[in-house]
Image (spheres, grey):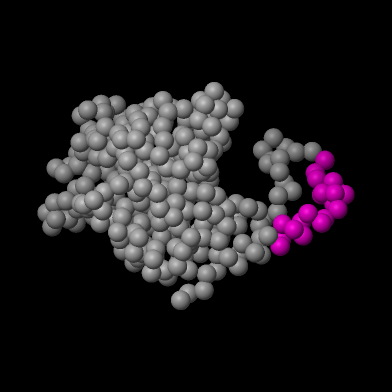
Amino acid sequence: MEKNRIGKRTRLATLWLASLCLLPLAAFAQAAPATTSADQPADELVPPTSASDFTSSQLDDALAGSWRTASFRARDVYRHPKATLQFFGIRPDQTVIEITPGGGWYSEILAPLLHDNGHYIAAVEKADAGEAKQDHDALHTKFAVDSAHYGKAQFVEFDPKAPVFGAPNSADLVLTFRNVHNWVMAGTAPAMFKAFFAVLRPGGVLGVEDHRASDGAALDSVKASGYLPTSYVEKLATDAGFRLDESSEINANPKDTKNYPKGVWTLPPTLALGEQDKAKYHAIGESDRMTLRFVKPVGSAAADSAR
């Protein structure tokens, strides 16, 4: 079994931080510039091997891991996992809940990344049969056969009509990838976003990625296609108490015309039309996607009431 390199890097970073604390304060004072230009970052004393660089290195290790499914790895070019997770502010010491991970595309990155110093939780819908049950069983099996990378991962089952993902204010980061459209079609989206808000600590982050409808599209005209207006997803979050922190074009795809016979599922990886125009849809690639980062406000009445 491949030796886990992520733990080594964590221990090295801990030693580096400990040694940094021993440096005399005078050294910092001497190193500080007398003036700072308008376009110069104010934190010049942060060394090149900062926490963000360390997280980047660990992400590289997780993305290159031999445990990743080959067909999953092939989708990196469309899904930009490193840039996406960095945009959401992930760190290897966080408690992260992934909502409805499906077959575990992101689980294969997140669970090993968080294995040593963090906490990965897969939130799966209660299901007795169907695709959700198959995904649930497959993910359990994936984790069970590779304890070196998934041994500390946990599951929480939820009822989408009355979801609970854990103790209030217990998570640092909640992530969901290409799931909101399903909840919108099922009528459970408002309850899901309220539950995200409840489980996140004040200052915690909700990261959302989903298929993006054309500008000006009405919800009722597009929701059956799998695409959603960005403004509607933002409203779901802000109605639940979140603040939109930033949006990103990391997962944009200008080739996506969003007008297909089988909706978004016409495109890869589903290819709902089978061999019909397969080359055409492969040339388009995966869907155009919104990537949104929301924050649970600190000290607000909404955040305090969730405690």
Q: Residue furthest right?
A: 26
Q: Which residues are magenta?
A: 15-34
Instruction: Determine whether 141 is above or below 227 in the image.
Output: below
Residue 245 vs residue 131, the one in the foreground: 131
Total residue callouts: 0
Q: Residue furthest top?
A: 301
Residue located at (60% from left, 67% from top): 8
Which quadrant would the C terminus be assigned to in this image? top right
Q: Is residue 196 left or right of residue 89?
A: left
Q: Where residue 233 appears, x then y in whole percent? A: 36, 32
Residue 258 vs residue 97, the one in the foreground: 97
Q: Is residue 26 magenta?
A: yes
Residue located at (36% from left, 47% from top): 157
Instruction: Determine whether 295 is above or below 216 in the image.
Output: below
Q: Where residue 26 appears, x then y in whole percent? A: 87, 49
Residue 276 vs residue 97, the one in the foreground: 97
Quarter location, residue 138: bottom left
Residue 49 visible from this viewpoint: yes
Residue 171 vs residue 269, the one in the foreground: 171
Q: Is residue 44 left or right of residue 72?
A: right
Q: Where residue 21 appears, x then y in whole percent? A: 78, 54
Q: Is residue 167 left or right of residue 182?
A: right
Q: Residue furthest left?
A: 276
